[in-house]
Amino acid sequence: MNQVIFDYTRQDASGASCTAHAWAKVPEPLTGDQKEQWKERAKALLKQHDAVLVAHYYVDGDLQDLALETGGCVADSLEMARFGRDHPSKTLVVAGVRFMGESAKILSPDKRVLMPDLDATCSLDLGCPPEDFAAFCDAHPDRKVVVYANTSAAVKARADWMVTSSCALAIVQHLKDQGEKILWAPDRHLGRYIQEQTGADMLMWNGACIVHDEFKGVELELLRQEHPGAKVLVHPESPRSVVALADVVGSTSQLLNAVVQSEAQTFIVATDNGILHRMRQLAPHKTLIEAPTAGNSATCKSCAHCPWMAMNALQGVVGCLEHGSGEITVPEPVRSEALGCIQRMLDFVARNPASIARPAQGFVPNVGAA
Ligand code: SF4
C-alpha cells in the first residue's frame, strides 16, 4: 500500500474546519493480467452474493467498468443513492467514500451495504464534526439547515435538507422563495456559488474539498489561452476564481453531459480526474485536458485525484464480498433521523424532475447518464 498523509490545517476563527493528519492508503497498481483475474473473481462473487456494484465517477476506471459490466451503475452521489435503493439485490457494494455507503444504508436498512475500504473518507465529512455542527445549529435556530451529501449520518440527522451538487441550486432557490434563511454546511465554495446564484441568506460552515480547493484560476487562465477553442467545465466545489472562468458549472453528471452534448471538441475539466474515464468512453473523439492544480507546493498531494476515492480497488471489492468486511452500519435513531433530510431531497427531485436540469451556468440538459 502507498500511504498518503495529509497535514491540512485550515481553521476559521472557531477552529471548525480541520482535517489535519487524515490519511489514505492507496493500493498498489495491478498489471493487466492481475486486473483481469481480480475482475473475474469480483464478477463471480457479485453473482454468488446477489450483490450489485454502485460506483462513483471518481473511482478507478476498472471499478467503473466492472460496475457497468455486471448490471451496476456509475453515477454521482444522487444517482448512487437512488440506484441502490431501487435495485433488487440484497447486497450493495458501494465504491466511493464513506458518506456514500452511509447514505445507501440509510435508504436501504434491510440491505447489506459493503465498501471496499471503510477508511475511504472525505475532507468535507472530516471537517464537519457532528458535535461542533450541532452547536452551530443550536446557535441559529431560526435557519433551515441544509447540508451537502458529503457529511456523516450524524450531521445529516441534524439537518432539514440534504442536497447534492445536482439539485442544490433548485432546493436553495425553493427555500428562499418560501422566505427561509439557510444554515449551509460544509463546502464553503459550493455554498458561496449557490448564494451568488440565488441571492439566498446563507450562513456558511467553513469546509472544503481538498481536491477542488487546489484548482487555481491563474493557472487555468494560462491553460485556456493555450487552448482558445476549449470549453472550461468546473465543479462548483472549486474556488471562485476558477468558477469565474467556467463555460459550464455543474455536478459530475452535468459536466459529463456537457462533454457528450456540446458541439465543442476540446474541454478543460476542473473536477477529480477520475471522471475522465467515463467522459472518454462516452465521447471518445473529444479532447479532454485536466485543469491545473497548484502542483508540488500545494497542500493537496493528490493532483486532482481524491486519495480516498483512490482507495477503492478491485481487490477491495473481492475482499469485502469474500470476508463480509467493510460493512456499513448506521445505528438508530441516527439512521431514521438522517433519512428525513435525504427523503425530503428525493421527494423534491421526484416532484420537480427539471430541478436537476436547472440551468447552472452554461448548463446542458441531463441525459440521464448515471
Ligand atoms: S473529491 Fe473531495 S468532495 Fe469528493 S470525496 Fe474526495 S475529498 Fe470529498
Image (tube, grey):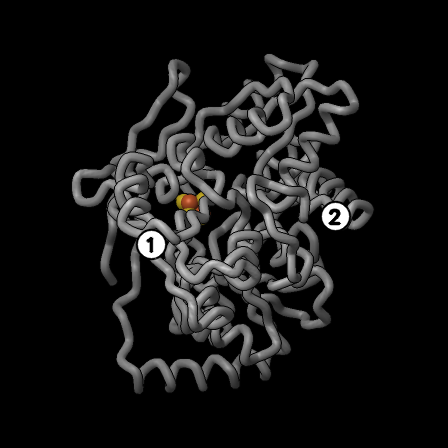
Q: CA distance from mark 2 to mark 1?
A: 29 Å
Q: In this view of the protein, which residue sits in the foreground, 290 or 28? A: 290
Queried on whether the Cβ of the residue with tag 2 lies below 8 angstroms from ligand 1, the answer reads no
What crowding class fits label 2: few (fewer than 14 Cα within 10 Å), some (14-19), or many (20 or more)? some
Q: Residue 341's spot in the image, x, y percent?
A: 70, 38
Does residue 96 lie above or below 331 as drawn?
below
Which residue appears at 47% of the width and 58% of the height?
264
Q: Residue 320's spot in the image, x, y percent?
A: 47, 69
Which residue appears at 76% of the width and 24% of the height?
177
Amino acid of disc 1: Glu
Taking the image as shown, residue 75 lies to the left or right of residue 128, namely right
Q: Which mark is residue 354?
A: 2
Does residue 9 lie above or below 312 as drawn?
above
Amino acid of disc 2: Ala
Does residue 4 lie above or below 318 as drawn?
above
Taking the image as shown, residue 349 lies to the left or right of residue 215, namely right
Q: Which residue is mark 1?
A: 290
Q: Residue furthest front?
A: 228
Q: Quadrant of the N terminus?
A: bottom left
What crowding class fits label 1: few (fewer than 14 Cα within 10 Å), some (14-19), or many (20 or more)? some
Taking the image as shown, residue 308 lies to the left or right of residue 145, namely left
- Tally of numbered discs: 2
